[in-house]
Amino acid sequence: MVFQEEHITEIGKKLHQAGMKLTPQRRATVNTLLKYQTKHLSAEELFTLIKLEEPEIGLATVYRTLDLLTELQIVERVTFDDGVARYDLRRADQQHFHHHLLCSVCGKVEEIHEDLLGEVENEVLRKYGFTVQDHRLTFHGVCEACSRKERYQDQG
Ligand SMILES: [Zn+2]
Ligand SMILES: [Zn+2]
């Protein structure tokens, strides 16, 4: 995928600016994050997948790489209801971190990539003199598939 290659080059540049190299281990980690970018995987889940590409890699290296990528704001650490830290790639073309929709019935996490908060941010600036640079937003509720099922059961 061309887009994926471009994204990796972009991340390689960021690492380089921070004085780091895109080692094979880091490359495999970034590759896996890109491949599963809407899956919100934990470090252990990522480790299992990265090993397919880079069998020699150890869990400690994966943790260190994820810490480094988090520090450089290439990935975000997100936590949902199960309290497990998961890793989520920031989109290069987006100024703000995307929002999440967490279904309380099936536990599915969907992403919203539109910002939607422009007016709220202006309001915060106006009322509190606070300039919003970023945000973490998780909407808790019931997803479309689960709502449909509930409706169906109500009728039955
Ligand atoms: Zn996400
Ligand atoms: Zn659901």
Image: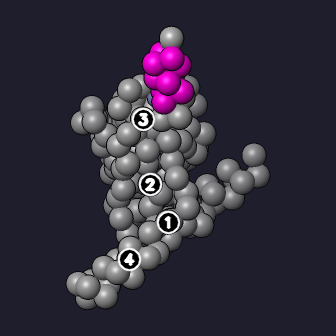
Task: Kindly identify which residue carries mark 1.
Answer: 116
Q: Are marks 4 and 1 in contact (CB under 8 Å)?
A: no
Q: Is mark 2 within 8 Å of ligand 1?
A: no
Front-most of residues 79 and 111: 111
Mark 4 is on which residue type?
Answer: Glu
Looking at the rendered structure, the secondary structure element under dot 1 is: loop
Residue beneath label 3, please?
142
Residue 49 placed where, x, y %? 51, 28
Is residue 90 at least partly visible in the picture?
A: yes
Which residue type carries mark 2?
A: His
Badge 4 or badge 1: first in the primary sequence: 1
The numbered mark, 3 or 1, whose residue comes first in the sequence reads 1
**Residue picked out by circle 2:** 99
Task: Give the residue pinned by disc 4.
Answer: 121
Residue drawn 42% across the image and 25% down it: 106
- Residue 63: say if magenta: no
| Secondary element at tag 2 | strand
* Mark found first going from the N terminus, 1 or 2: 2
Which mark lies nearer to you, 1 or 2?
1
> Does the beta carbon of the residue at mark 3 sit less than 8 Å from ligand 2?
yes
Calculate the distance from the C-alpha at mark 3 to the C-alpha at mark 4.
26 Å
The kind of secondary structure element at disc 4 is helix
CA neighbours of label 2 inside 10 A, class few (<14), some (14 to 19), many (20+): some
Res 66 seen here: no
Is the residue under label 2 in contact with that under label 1 (CB below 8 Å)? yes
Contact (Cβ within 8 Å) of mark 2 with mark 3: no
Q: Which residues are magenta?
A: 146-155
Disc 3 element:
loop
- Tell me which residue sits at (67%, 50%) in the image: 4
